Image (spheres, coloured by chain):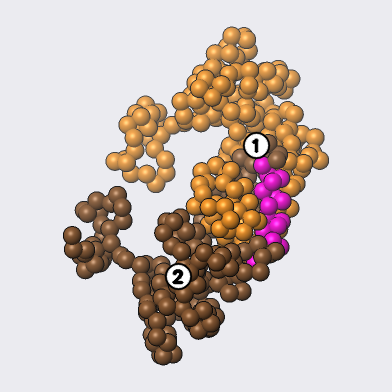
Chain colours: A orange, B brown
Amino acid sequence: MSGLLPKALTEVIDELGHLPGVGARTAERYAYYLLRARPTIANKLASSLEKLHTDVKSCPVTFALIDASQEVSPLYSNPGRDKTLIAVVEEPLDIVALERTGQYHGTYHVLGGALSPIDGVGPEQLHIPELIERIKNDNVQELIIATNASVEGESTALFLQKYIRDENIEIKMSRLARGIPVGVDLEYADQITLGHALEGRRIL
Amino acid sequence: MSGLLPKALTEVIDELGHLPGVGARTAERYAYYLLRARPTIANKLASSLEKLHTDVKSCPVTFALIDASQEVSPLYSNPGRDKTLIAVVEEPLDIVALERTGQYHGTYHVLGGALSPIDGVGPEQLHIPELIERIKNDNVQELIIATNASVEGESTALFLQKYIRDENIEIKMSRLARGIPVGVDLEYADQITLGHALEGRRIL
């Protein structure tokens, strides 16, 4: 269909089509919206994208995303955070989810993914050696293994647990509780979740 | 949650959040994808967005979208297109949909929307005077009113039909056929569509 739409519009459609889950129709809708909206909307998006890779880097200690101008993550350097408690997560955005609870005052460690033989992700692709080093340097007392509740997340948690035991590190390790999410009716809960909820029931 | 993510990433998330139907979570997913992907992906999207408004304009005759360097739409200037046949559509992207059929060799006229009192769109917001002028200048024989099969599209079609009759213009006017879409089971077709399909049935 090249030639039907102006070249500049086709280019925006093609580039938006790279976004995850965005097909040709959605990309067309986004591009057409940007064309009809005030030019500042497209231009501000453009200039924000130009700074994305130059102004963001990984924290060398926690592997959280930080400003290029920062040395380490403020969630690590902040003296109010308990450095002897680490929540181990798969991706940087998981930190945002945990911070939203407002209930966690430890630090974080981003693995950079989860074990997935199909995608070619083995332990050597994850930031495990750096975690071991932190455990030793910061005299860490507890590790909350907060990987996802997926097959990959579970196997990563198991691997990590075994790896740390094999290194003869004495440390408390925990996993996030599994159970019925808030607002979900029992009849709609899947059997595995319900099984976990039964197993982890709390005495009143 | 400001301060949790690097400023440059937050900015991209905010700007992507302007896209239609994109909430905070989707914008986060898009922005994080762009950050993890090669920088060229974000940079090419940025430069395509910068050219969007400068390099695209509306055809002054058909109101299709054209390159800023073009005078009129190639779908109008092309001598292979029948100028005495006009398909009237709501939006420029509708042209792409009709062209995909490969069965249409007339020209197009983009109204620039549909009548919608709720959204404050009256006849004066649509390119109707320019359509009347074209009908006269190009000695147009048939008008295919190809507005959407929505309430707004239907009322726009009715309005246009009445408007042209009131102007005492002798011209054949038609609407696209309504019926069962290809691949759809009868049991899943809604009653209005099925009603149209019965009414418009073809003798074999």
> Relative to A102, does residue A127 appear above or below in the rendering?
above
Badge 1 crowding class, 10 Å Cα cut-off, few under 14, some 14 to 19, many 20 or more, is some
Disc on the earlier residue, 1 or 2: 1
Residue B139 or A187: which is nearer the viewer? B139
**Label 2: element kind:** strand
> Relative to B52, does residue B133 appear above or below in the rendering?
below
What amino acid is found at the position of numbered circle 2 in the picture?
Ala
Where residue B49 appears, as percent x and y from the top left, is 68, 55
The residue stretch that appears in magenta: B41-57
Image-based side of A98 in relation to B54, left or right: left
> Relative to B184, does residue B200 appear above or below in the rendering?
below
Badge 2 crowding class, 10 Å Cα cut-off, few under 14, some 14 to 19, many 20 or more, is many
Where residue B3 appears, as percent x and y from the top left, is 70, 46
- Does the image show residue B30? yes
Residue B94 or B45: which is nearer the viewer? B94
Q: Chain of mark 1?
A: B
Instruction: Choose top left, top right, bottom left or bottom right for residue A75.
Output: top right
- What residue does disc 1 label? B37
Identified at 51% across, 31% down, the residue is A148
Identified at 69% across, 30% down, the residue is A62
